[in-house]
Image (cartoon, helix red, strand yellow):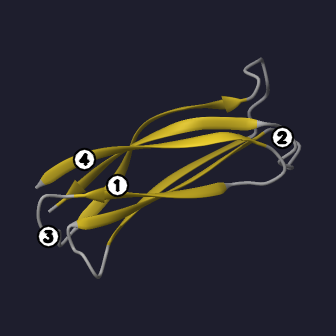
Amino acid sequence: MEVRTTTFSFNRLKGSGPRSARNEVVFTGPVTQAAAFIKGFDVGFSPRKDHHLGNLEIRADATIDSLASQRVFVDVVYGLRDWSGNWDDNYEGEVFVTVIGE
């Protein structure tokens, strides 16, 4: 079993969400099982000021590359909005993910 970490940075955005990003994590040998766990996050509206939180969505998933089994693709989905139901406020942040491969 090996453990790796990766960080996802989401620049300031408004007008759409949630959004997704992909990183690849390389292990020292072939992986037959992989799992991604959210280790933490630093997210918020931008600029950072008092704002009502309506919906925060953060998800992580791991997929082993079928062509190179030592490589794992990590996908993260992140979205943040208020109670308006629209993506009309700037938001940004970082999501920290731990990946376990076996």
Sequence-wise first label, 4 or 1: 4
Query: Answer yes or no: do the residues labelled 2 and 3 have beta carbons within 8 Å?
Result: no
Residue bearing the label numbered 2: 83
Q: Position of residue 101 (x, y in %)?
A: 20, 59
State the separation of the CA atoms marked 4 and 1: 10 Å
User: Which tag is nearer the camera, tag 2 or tag 1?
Assistant: 1
Badge 2 local density, few (<14 within 10 Å), some, or many (20+)?
few
Badge 3 local density, few (<14 within 10 Å), some, or many (20+)?
some
Q: Which mark is residue 96?
A: none
User: Which tag is nearer the camera, tag 3 or tag 1?
Assistant: 3
25 relative position to 83: left or right: left
94 relative position to 50: left or right: left
State the SS at label 3: loop
Vertical side of 61 occupied by 78: above or below? above
State the separation of the CA atoms marked 2 and 3: 45 Å
Residue bearing the label numbered 4: 4
Amino acid carrying label 4: it is: Arg
Amino acid carrying label 3: it is: Pro
26 relative position to 78: left or right: left
Residue bearing the label numbered 1: 36
Q: Where is residue 68 in the image (x, y as percent from the top left)?
A: 24, 76
Amino acid carrying label 2: it is: Trp
Residue at 19 percent of width and 58 percent of height: 27
Q: Nearer the viewer, residue 55 or 14?
A: 14
Query: Answer yes or no: do the residues labelled 4 and 3 have beta carbons within 8 Å?
Result: no
Residue bearing the label numbered 3: 30
Sequence-wise first label, 2 or 3: 3
Q: Position of residue 96 (x, y in %)?
A: 42, 39
